[in-house]
Amino acid sequence: MTLSLPSLRPIHLIFALVLAAFAAVLIAQIEGERGVAPIASNGDFEVRDIKVDVYGPNAEAARSTGWRLAQRRGWSALWQRTHGGAGASLPDSALDGLVSGIEVQEEQIGPNRYIATLAVMFDRARAGQALGVSGHVMHSPPLLLIPVLWDGGTATTFEHVTEWQKAWAMFRTADSAIDYVRTTGDGADPMLLNAGQIDRRGRNWWRVLLDLYGAADVVMPIARLERSWPGGPVTGHFSARYGPDNQYIGGFTLRAARSADIPKMMADAVTRMDALYTQALNSGRLRPDPSLVIEEPVNAVELTNVAELDSLLAALPSENGGAGAAYSVQVDTPSAASVGEIEALVRGVPGVRSAATTSLALGGTSIMQVTFTGPVDQLRAGLEARGFAVTGSGTTIRIARRAAAAPAAPAGGNGQ
């Protein structure tokens, strides 16, 4: 007996081709180069955009001279950043022990000339001792990062490599107070973390995503590019948003003279965006959404307001025999010297058991944990008596140095 296979009709062939094309599209959506893996962020101090232009007897000697010069300039910039002035120079042998790495941003190597833009990393432990800077930096809870880029009317996250996602991947988070959860864009990331997700409000799906990526909440930095003409000037509009409700924190606008300068503009935008998130964290705006956490109900006393809770906490006896209540004090610290000076003034307030800086931000707002025995009004009065202007309420207050009063005019005012 001879068996014959049935012949394929044209409609069957067309259907098979459609299935093959559909399968190819599904594979293309998952495979391929999607995102840039984030760089390892350690605890080093980093000084970027150090420009050198040096000569030498040969290319290797010129490059070595350029790197030595970059170390010196980097140390000078780091000292100025932490102390606000020019510091004592260190010999190259000492700098070799402080520098943990040098990153080449751009370089041109000639037979006897070396032109480059470099970034110098200083070991935080060893350099911190030389700088005289110490302190623990408070970090936010882990926040899932979804960078959205609008370009040409299309929103992109991890569907393909973009300069916005690349800039976030290359951002060093060691000095940031924000604990970013950065993904590589592989696997299911393009489908789960797409631009449409940031407009969804359903808490159940957000809980699944955050649990999958090990985060407590989400931040969505958004960049929108406006191009004047191909290769010409580019205007970037940037906005910082967070949470499942897509809440707005702040925004700014940057401009690039040509399309080739977009990577530099994106790197600058990431730094400014991180500053916006850090300010929101320090001011209490950037807090994890409680609706994202599922907790079992507990039997607790119902409190009418936060002030009532603060008064109860202050009245509770301490395990250390009346050691007092803890207060979070925000204060501007323009230099390293101001940190110790402000701590000494706060410790001098009657009733203060301890005062230590737990989140150090030189040139910005630091956070000091103060243990005080007594009501908060008494603490506020003691701080005001030492020349501070006090704002805030509850266990979180902010202090600032009062401006010195202008000297009184001499009697007569006409020199007689």
Image (spheres, helix red, strand yellow):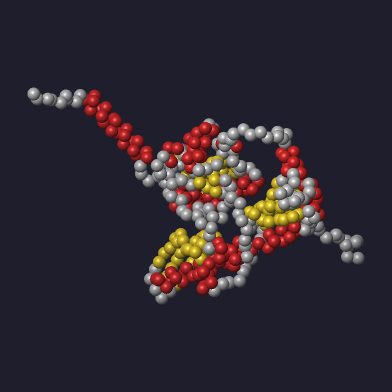
Q: Position of residue 412 (x, y in %)?
A: 91, 61
Name the image quarter holding the C terminus.
Answer: bottom right
Please give the name of the residue rendered at 59% of the width and 34% of the height, measured from the top-left corner: 296
Residue 64 image-quadrant placement = bottom left
Q: Position of residue 242 (x, y in %)?
A: 56, 41
Residue at x 56% of width, y 55% of height? 175
Give me the residue at 56% from left, 65% from top. Answer: 127
In this rendering, would 54 be left or right of 247?
Answer: left
Query: How many numbered tags mark residues here?
Result: 0
Q: Residue furthest left?
A: 1
Query: Relative to residue 110, is residue 317 depicted above or below?
Result: above
Instruction: Let me know if residue 318 appears in the view.
Output: yes
Along the viewing direction, whichever of 169 and 257 lies nearer the viewer: 169
Looking at the image, which residue is at 53% across and 50% down? 270
Residue 91's spot in the image, x, y percent? 54, 74
* View extreme (bottom): residue: 57
Q: Name the quadrant of the N terminus.
A: top left
Could you say where residue 83 lies in the image, as x and y percent from the top left?
A: 64, 63
Say whether residue 87 is left or right of residue 305. Answer: left
Task: Indicate left or right for 212 with 250 as reference.
Answer: left
Foreground of the two, 359 or 225: 359
Picture layout, residue 399 above or below residue 304: below
66 vs 349, nearest the viewer: 349
Residue 136 left/right relative to 394: left
Answer yes or no: is residue 392 visible.
no
